[in-house]
Amino acid sequence: MRLASLGVAAFLIVGACGSAATPSPAATTAPSAAAPSTASSAGTPPTCVSGSITTAGSTALQPLIDAAGKQYTTACSGASIQVQGGGSGTGLTQVLQGTVQIGDSDITAESKLQPADASQLIDHLVVRQGWVMVVNPSVTGVTNLTTQQASDIWTGKITNWKGVGGNDQPIVLILRPQSSGTRAVFKQVVLKGAQEASGQALTEDSNGAVTQAVTATPGATSVIGFAYYQQSKGALVGLQLDGVDATVANMANGSYKIQAFGHMYTKGQPTGLTKAFLDYMLSPAIQGTLVPSLFYAPAAQ
């Protein structure tokens, strides 16, 4: 198992942002994996440990952890793994309080908790992940935003799409709550710490809810995890950042900036089923197959 205490860092996004594909229904919950369906099909069966654990936190990580949990419990009939969302802040708080065994987060514990609390948690880096700025298809003439343009939109300086070369349509901002890791990463990378527009934006509490809200709201924009975007192409349009497409390759070479490690925290050293599942998350069955199939990148990449 790989333990670390690295800060928020790079990640990805994929796909040809700015171009709409065949319309498909927007995701309202965590997307599911396309393949493989069982651990044995990936050639690396897990070490089975019986018991029951719960993970909670980042909804950006939820599609991957949910799919991995299903693979593990399919292969190991004596295990039960419950996967919940709630946001990175919730995951960190709940694992610290001992109400869940694993807290899933897009940000480091040190950036969210008091030092004495963060020191009780152990960081397991399991993946690299990214986010894409998306708009409702009613927005035309905009396929790319510079970091400055994006910051001006999110801080309320630009309130109409014509201000960035688009059609004459009011911008509807959809944000995440303070507990969101997605919000924290975007605020750090794009807004450089500036405060989002106050009183001019809607707030949704998960990647799935944001995806649904942007899809249903003319002029809307927000930021969602790439796994959600891949299942929403056509219903949503992804934008480039500073002329760079959101692709795994661009994440890997560092040219695409809205990215971060995905963390799974435990309170102290993991044991039993918690340790077995974390080991499985870093196994070839997950890192080499499930991770790329859901448009994340391996933790070691």
Image: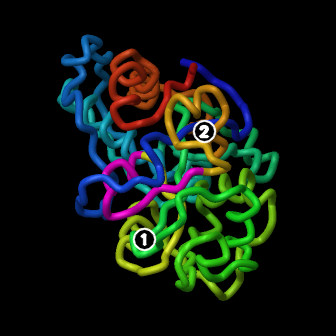
Q: Residues within 10 Å of mark 1 (few under 14, many from 20)?
A: many
Name the residue located 40 percent from the left edge and 65 percent from the top edge: 211
Q: Point out residue 229 in the picture as x, y percentages from the top left corner.
A: 40, 53
Q: Name the image quarter holding residue 197.
A: bottom right
Q: Nearer the viewer, residue 280 or 173?
A: 173
Q: Is residue 230 magenta?
A: yes
The kind of residue tagged 1 is Asn
217 on left or right of 223: left
Residue identifier under label 2: 267
Q: Residues within 10 Å of mark 2 (few under 14, many from 20)?
A: many
Q: Nearer the viewer, residue 179 or 34?
A: 34
Q: Point out residue 78 in the picture as x, y percentages from the top left corner.
A: 21, 30
Name the residue located 20 percent from the left edge and 17 percent from the top edge: 40
Give the colour scheme of this rendering.
Answer: rainbow
Q: For the C terminus, which image quadrant?
A: top right
The kind of residue tagged 2 is Lys
Q: For the N terminus, which image quadrant?
A: top right
Residue identifier under label 1: 136
Q: Which segment is the magenta one?
A: 227-240
Q: Nearer the viewer, residue 73 or 289?
A: 289
Q: Point out residue 91 in the picture as x, y percentages from the top left corner.
A: 54, 52
Label 2, label 1: how many angstroms apart (C-alpha)?
41 Å
